[in-house]
Image: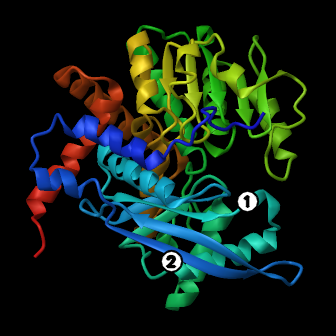
């Protein structure tokens, strides 16, 4: 079964983002005008552009790039290729990026981009032509000092290489720092590919340690999604000795109560052009609903937004949820899970590893001075544990759950910076 939201109605992610914002900002003593300002994207670019397909036909594609906020610095955020991308989804993802960057104290605001397409149905040459034309269309608002894209769902390091090259050809010289998540041989950073998934497990490990659950072999972990985030989360957890009992992707779920050999799973997906789990035989097939409802200690939703809703939150048996995806849990589901005593490590904390190492890559690119992977991972852990501490302290101060605490912390930083800078003119 495809890993998609199971609610019968469409859930608008931007409305979810605004609900979360309204819950958190109510605790802050900010002027009403500042609170209103932070609800709105700074700018939105919609583009429609032609791409020549391999058969010679011309097809029109639509895409977006949204800057939510730039008070703390240039905007930062990924670009996703998916059939269901729409402007409200991109708005929500850009807003979450603002809070994520502020939470881990990066000098960035939030942005996001997307193109409506199915990358699995396009050839490599078609993907390159689409990417280069999209990059040309959004080049009017990206630069290493204004907006720095990165990979997201449906895009990868090669996508970033094409964007970097297109932008560089436009300005007449190489600009490696215009994107992050690039291949190493053109200015990428060690540790970037696995950073988001690694960060999920760093946060999970810290939360378990604080609960006194410091024996990984006794922890059963379920991971929804086996793309760049879920696969590296599974790998890092497996290497630490955690028992990963179930995984999934768009081809369905795979369960082994004794624990999966993640090295074996990744070897299997590496043989598939699109890196899918389909055909994996060392586990029992299960549906997405069954995967989310498995008996386990930790559930890590690493797929897409709106996976845990009021329709299925009652079925979740995990005592901890660590959000590798952006916006996987709706506010209504939050209420149900909090009532049940489930600890939720929210997305803007749990999956901040990717943008943190993207920041490291950006800094390395601007300085042309590169770090080894040990330094990258050491700095990543430092940043995430510091942010984790701050969220816990805020939760205790305001007597709120971890998501609200994370958003309070982030919104306060952006709001205070807005007041300090003042309103232009």
- Residue 136 position in % (x across, y down): 56, 82
Q: Name the residue under label 1.
A: 118
Helix, strand or loop at label 2? It is helix
26 relative position to 58: left or right? left
Q: Which residue lies furthest to the front in this view?
A: 9
Q: State which tag comes first along the sequence, 2 or 1.
A: 1
Q: Nearer the viewer, residue 37 or 69?
A: 37
Q: Nearer the viewer, residue 80 or 211?
A: 80
39 relative position to 333: left or right? left
> For the point 52% across and 41% down, which residue is it?
11
Q: Name the residue under label 2.
A: 138
- Residue 362 position in % (x across, y down): 44, 63
The residues bearing labels 2 and 1 have C-alpha atoms spaced at a distance of: 20 Å
93 lies above or below 217:
below
Helix, strand or loop at label 1? It is loop
Image quadrant occupied by the N terminus: top right
> For the point 54% across and 44% down, which residue is it?
195
Q: Which of marks 2 and 1 is in front?
A: 1
């Amino acid at each position: 079964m495809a890993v998609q939201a199971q609610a019968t109605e469409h859930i608008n992610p931007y409305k979810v983002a605004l609900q979360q914002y309204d819950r958190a900002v109510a605790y802050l003593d900010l002027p009403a005008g500042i609170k209103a300002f932070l609800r709105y994207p700074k700018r939105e670019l919609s583009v429609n552009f032609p791409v020549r397909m391999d058969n010679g036909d011309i097809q029109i594609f639509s895409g977006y790039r949204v800057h939510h906020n730039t008070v703390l610095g240039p905007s930062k955020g990924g670009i996703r290729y998916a059939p269901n991308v729409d402007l409200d989804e991109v708005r929500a993802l850009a807003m979450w990026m603002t809070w994520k960057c502020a939470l881990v104290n990066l000098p960035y605001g939030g942005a996001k981009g997307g193109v409506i397409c199915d990358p699995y149905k396009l050839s490599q040459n078609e993907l390159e032509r689409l990417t280069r034309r999209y990059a040309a269309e959004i080049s009017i608002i990206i630069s290493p000092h204004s907006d720095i894209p990165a990979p997201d769902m449906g895009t990868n390091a090669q996508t970033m290489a094409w964007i970097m090259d297109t932008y560089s050809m436009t300005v007449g010289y190489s600009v490696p720092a215009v994107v992050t998540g690039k291949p190493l041989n053109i200015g990428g950073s060690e540790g970037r590919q696995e950073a988001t998934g690694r960060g999920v497990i760093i946060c999970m490990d810290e939360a378990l340690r604080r609960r006194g659950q410091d024996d990984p072999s006794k922890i059963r972990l379920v991971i929804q999604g086996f793309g760049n985030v879920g696969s590296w989360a599974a790998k890092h957890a497996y290497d630490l000795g955690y028992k990963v009992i179930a995984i999934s992707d768009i081809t369905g779920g795979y369960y082994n109560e004794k624990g999966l050999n993640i090295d074996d799973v990744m070897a299997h997906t590496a043989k598939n052009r699109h890196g899918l789990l389909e055909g994996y035989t060392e586990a029992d097939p299960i549906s997405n609903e069954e995967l989310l409802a498995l008996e386990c200690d930790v559930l890590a939703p690493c797929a897409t937004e709106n996976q845990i809703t009021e329709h299925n939150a009652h079925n979740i048996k995990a005592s901890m949820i660590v959000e590798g995806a952006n916006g996987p849990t709706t506010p209504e589901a939050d209420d149900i899970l909090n009532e049940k005593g489930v600890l939720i490590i929210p997305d803007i904390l749990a999956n901040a590893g990717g943008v943190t190492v993207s920041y490291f890559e950006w800094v390395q690119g601007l300085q042309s001075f590169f770090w080894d992977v040990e330094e990258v991972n050491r700095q990543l852990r430092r940043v995430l544990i510091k942010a984790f501490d701050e969220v816990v302290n805020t939760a205790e101060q305001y007597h709120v759950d971890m998501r609200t605490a994370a958003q309070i912390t982030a919104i306060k930083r952006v709001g205070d910076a807005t007041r300090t800078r003042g309103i232009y003119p």
